[in-house]
Image (tube, rainbow, N blue to C red):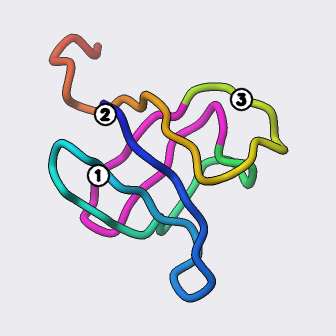
Amino acid sequence: MKIMIRRSPDAGLSIYVPKKDLEEPIVEAEHETLWGGWIKIANGWVLDLPQMAADTNLPITINAKKRGESGGER
């Protein structure tokens, strides 16, 4: 799914999902740099992010995968 990740002074890191008109703060991340790991947002979703450079500028729109969505995880 396409998401936008941005940094705001009051909320810290957050994501926006245009198709769902959903904006949620990131509450936990596997890696400090975000990229190549998972993030957890306030509504409980866990998203896998692509591998990118640690100094990638925000805001950025990327493809993320929601865990448990594919049905094929084993």
- 55 or 18: which is nearer to us? 18
The type of residue carrying mark 3 is Met
Residue 59 appears left or right of 46: right
The type of residue carrying mark 2 is Arg
Segment tinted magenta in the rendering = 35-49
Assign a secondary structure to mark 3: loop
Q: Which residue is drawn at 49% across and 33% down?
A: 62
Q: Does the magenta stretch include residue 41?
A: yes
- In the picture, which quadrant includes the C terminus? top left
The type of residue carrying mark 1 is Trp
Residue 27 picture location, percent across and down: 47, 69
* Relative vertical location of residue 68 with respect to residue 72 in this rendering, above or below: below
Between disc 1 and disc 3, the foreground one is 3
Between disc 3 and disc 2, the foreground one is 3
Marks 3 and 2 close (CB-CB < 8 Å): no
- The residue wearing badge 2 is 67
What is the tally of numbered marks visible in this picture? 3
